[in-house]
Structure formats: structure tokens, C-alpha cells
Amino acid sequence: MADHGKDDVLETGVRKMTRIDEASWTRSLLALFGEGMFAAVGARRHDDWRHDALDVMRLATADPRGWPRRVSAPGGEAYPPGPGGPFGAVTPDDVARVFPVAGRGAEQIVVTLQSEWFQTDGIPDFSAREAGLLSHAHELLGRFGEDALFFTNAVSAQNDPHADMFRREGTYEGFTGHVMDCGVLALSATEVGVFWGFTPD
């Protein structure tokens, strides 16, 4: 397997290892991802991990651990694999436009996917739920280990990967044909995860 590459180097800070199993993964997945959202993981099989991310986006690969995924279109129907899905037109060059983001920021972004416009003020009772939502995001991303790398299409990470992503600007490098989309790519030595939300047309 090739190195991550010079563009992928980011100090994510000290991340407490999360002991995660299928039950805890599923619990957090159900807590954070519902209609119009996408959460799936695939194995790293290519020298360039971006091709593995595309396989996950296109639902062309299964979870290497056999754990569940959540890929629900607005309205609740399952996203189809291949070009009919939300990432059907995405290319490796598109994936190369993502920005490194620190682990804490990645968790914050995953939490904000609860809101149609990916901002905390769109999450009902956010102040009371913040700790619980962050705990679930930490569970999901903890799967990728202490040395995980994270990337996002949120432009606020471009100049400061350690920025507070709860207070980011609402500007994104769009990956889909939806009005807006936002998410996190998670990368370990063996797995790639795609965690995304969509603002429908």
C-alpha cells in the first residue's frame, strides 16, 4: 500500500482510542444518519485511496467488517449503486479537492449533518444534545483508529484544519447535483469511510 502522500499529512492531535464493535457502531449510525444521508465504509484496495473512496460513494464495495451502512435518499428510499446514486458523477479529481480536517473538526462536521443546512442552529435542542451527538460521532470515527486522517469539502478547513467546525462558514466544494452537500472522508491504513449529508433540491 502506498504512503498517504504529501497532501494528506495532518496532525490530528491525540485521539483517545475508541473500543468499537458492531453494536456500538450500529447504535451511533442510527443516532446520526437518517433520510437523505450517506454513511458507508469500504476497504482500501488501491494505491490511491481516492479510488477506494469512489468505490464507497458508488456502493461498489461492501463493508469489510460486514457492519451496516446507512444510505437513504430524501423520502427514505435506498440510494441505488452506481451512477444513479448521489455521487454518480464524482471523479478522482473531485475527491482531490477535499481539505484535511482535524479529528475533532471531523466529529463536529458529522454532527452538523443533522441539519438541512449543516449548521448547529438547525439541530433541534442542540445545546442539550451536543455532548451525546459528539459522543456518537466519536464512536463512528473512532473505528478508523488513532492514526486516522480526515478530509472534508467544507471550505472553512482549507486555511485552518483545526478550526471550530461548529462555527464554520457555510461554503462547500459540492460533490453532487443537490443544492448543497457536506461531509467527511475518514481514512485508515485499511479502510475508507464516507459520511455525507445532502440538502435536497
Image (cartoon, grey):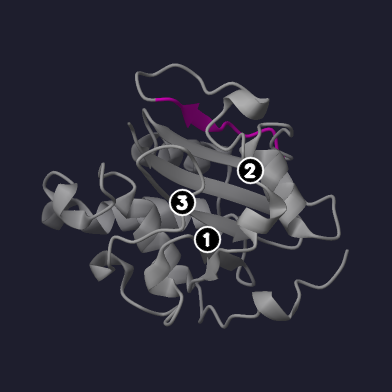
Q: Nearer the viewer, residue 90 or 124?
A: 90
Q: Earlier in the sequence, mark 3 or mark 2?
A: 2
The reply to whether discs 3 and 2 touch (Cβ–Cβ < 8 Å) is no
Give the residue drawn at x 74%, y 40%: 64
Disc 1 marks which amino acid?
Thr
Q: Nearer the viewer, residue 180 or 108?
A: 180
Identify the residue position indicated by label 1 in the image. 18
Q: Which mark is residue 41?
A: 2
| Main secondary structure along the magenta-highlighted residues | loop
Mark 2, residues whose alpha carbon is within 10 Å: few (<14), some, or many (≥20)?
many
Identify the residue position indicated by label 3 in the image. 174
Tell me if residue 145 can be seen: yes
Give the percent coordinates (x, y) of residue 60: 73, 32
Give the residue drawn at x 32%, y 68%: 165
- Distance of label 3 from label 1 (alpha carbons): 31 Å
Quadrant of the rendered image containing residue 84: top right
Q: Secondary structure at mark 1?
A: loop
- Distance of label 3 from label 2 (alpha carbons): 20 Å
Q: Earlier in the sequence, mark 3 or mark 1?
A: 1
Residue 101 lies, with reference to residue 25, above or below; the image says: below
Disc 3 marks which amino acid?
Gly
Give the residue drawn at x 69%, y 33%: 66
Residue 50 lies, with reference to residue 4, above or below; the image says: above
Q: Tell me the magenta residue range.
A: 65-73
Give the residue drawn at x 38%, y 31%: 36
The label nearer to you, 3 versus 2, is 3
- Say whether residue 129 is left or right of residue 105: left
Q: Secondary structure at mark 2?
A: strand
Disc 2 marks which amino acid?
Val
Q: Which mark is residue 110?
A: none
